[in-house]
Image (cartoon, rainbow, N blue to C red):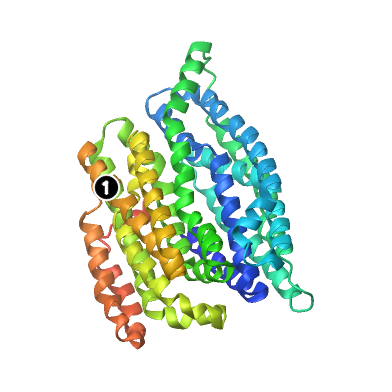
Amino acid sequence: MAGSALAGGTGVVVTWVVARALGAEQAGAFFAATAAFVLVGGLAKLGTQTGLVYWPARLRSTGQEHLLGACLRAGIPPVAGFSLVLGVAMWLAAPAIAHLTAGESPEVVAGHTAGLRVLAVFVPLQALTDVLLTVTRGYRSMRPTVLLDRLLRSGLQLLAVGAAGVAALWVTASLPVFALAWASPYLPVAILAAVAARRAYTSGRTTVSTDRGERHRVRREFWVFTAPRAVAAVAQLALQRVDVLLLAALGGLAPAAVYAVAGRFVVLIQFANQGLSQSVQPRLAETLSTGDLAAAKRLYQTATGWLVLVTWPISLLVMAFAPWYLRLFGDGYASGVPVVRVLAAAMLVATGCGMVDMVLAMAGRTSLNLGNVLIALVVTIGLDVLLIPRWGALGAAAGLAGAMVVNNLLPLAQVHRSTGLHPFGRGTLTAALLALLCFGFIQFFPAAIVIAVPAYAASAWLLRGPLMLGAFRRKS
C-alpha cells in the first residue's frame, strides 16, 4: 500500500511537470502517446499477468510444484516474442497514430510521431517487466513488485521527467525528450525483475521429473485459462486509455490534456486497488482452487474494507477541492472540475465493489470476465463517440464513468451467483460509513478538512477491530 501510494503520488507530480513544461497541445500529445504505449504493452502481455499468478498458486496448493517450470515456460517466451513484434508495429504506425490524434494541430504531429517511436522501443521492456514481476507474485512475494515497480521505476521516472522539466526552463521543451525520460526506467527495472523472477523460481524448484504429457497438459490448460484473459486485459487497458485517444481525435489535444490532468487522481486510486489485489490474488487463487469459500470470503471482504478506507476519502476530497488543485497545473485546466466530480462519483461505486474483476478471474471464470470488459468497452466507446463532440472532456468522463459502473456491477452479480461471495462485510460497511461521515460534508464546508482528517484517523484506530487492521501485524 505504501508503494502504491508513492507510485500514485509520483505519477501526479510527473503529470504536473509535463502539463507545465509542454503546454496544453504538446501535453495532450504526450498523454495520447503514453496511452498508446500502455495499450500496446497490455496487448503484448497476452493476459499472463493473471495466468502466471493463478497457475503457480494452483499448482502449489494441489501438490504439483514440479510443473511450475513448465508453467513459466508456457507464459514468458510468447510475451517476449509478441512484444518485439508489437514494438516494431508501433514504430511503423507512429505517423498514422500522430495524424489521427493530432490532426487538428499539425505543428505537433512531427514531435508526436517521434515521441511515439521513442516509446515503441520500450514496449518489450515494459511487457517483460510486468510479466517477470507477476512471476514473483505467483510465489507470494510482493517485495520485488514494490521495490522495483512502485519505488524504483516511479522514482526514476520522477527524476528523469523532472530533469527534462528543469531543462525546459532554458531550452525549448521537446516531446520526444519527455517520452524518453518517462520510458527509460524500464531498462534497469526489467533487468532487475529478471533477476528477481529467477531467484523466486530457483528457490522453489523441485527435483521431481516431469514427462512430456504433463508439460503439454499444463501448457494447454494455461492458455485455455489465459487466452480469454489476454483479450480482457487489453480491453481493460482500453477502458483506461482509449478515452484519451478518442478525445484527442474528436475534441483536440488541449481538451485531452485537461481530461488527462483532471482524471489523474483515478490512477492514484487504481494504484491502491492494484496494490491490494496483487497481494490478495495468489492467496485467493489457493483458497478457491481448494474450495475454501469461507476463507475466500474473508479475504475479499477484508481487502474491500481496506480499499474503501483508503480510497473513499480521496474521491470525496478531490470532489470538494477540484477547483483549487486543478489550478496548480495551469490556468487552462480549471475547466476540468466537472470531469473530476463525475469520475470521483463513479470511483465510489467501483471501489465499493472491491477487486471483483480479479475475484471472478481467480474463480476460473475468465470467459465471463472477458464478456464483462467487452461490454464495458462498448459502453465507453459508444458514449464517447456520442458525447465528446457535444461536451468535450466531460463527455469522455461520462463514457468512462458508465464503463466503470458496468464493469463492476456485472461481475459483482456473477461472483455472487456462482460462488456466493460478496464484498459487503462488516469492515466494508464500517469504512464506507466512516468516510461519508467524516468527508461527506466537506463538499459544502471545505474548511472542515482540518477536523475531518484527524477525526477519520482517530475513528479508524478506534474501529480497528471491525476494519481488521490488526492483520497488518500478523504473518501467515
- The answer to whether residue 98 is seen in the rendering is yes
| Residue 76 found in image quarter | top right
Residue pictured at 46% horizontal, 69% vertical = 392
Q: Residues within 10 Å of mark 1 (few under 14, many from 20)?
A: many
Whole-percent x and y of residue 38?
A: 57, 51
**In the rendered view, would you say 408 is above or below 216?**
below
Residue pictured at 38% horizontal, 45% vertical = 373
**In the rendered view, would you say 83 is above or below 351?**
above
Q: How many marks?
A: 1
At label 1, the amino acid type is Leu
Describe the element under mark 1 as helix, strand or loop. helix
**In the rendered view, would you say 31 is above or below 410?**
below
- Give 64 or 221, whichever is nearer the viewer: 221
Residue pictured at 69% horizontal, 52% vertical = 95
The quadrant of the image that shows the N terminus is bottom left
Whole-percent x and y of residue 202?
A: 58, 31
| Residue 30 found in image quarter | bottom right
| Residue 131 found in image quarter | top right
Whole-percent x and y of residue 119?
A: 68, 52
Position of 461 compared to 253: left or right? left
- The answer to whether residue 476 is seen in the rendering is no
- Give 30 or 198, whichever is nearer the viewer: 30
The quadrant of the image that shows the C terminus is top left
**In the rendered view, would you say 184 is above or below 107?**
above
The residue beneath circle 1 is 412
Residue pictured at 55% horizontal, 64% vertical = 11
Whole-percent x and y of residue 308?
A: 32, 61
Position of 470 compared to 380: left or right? left
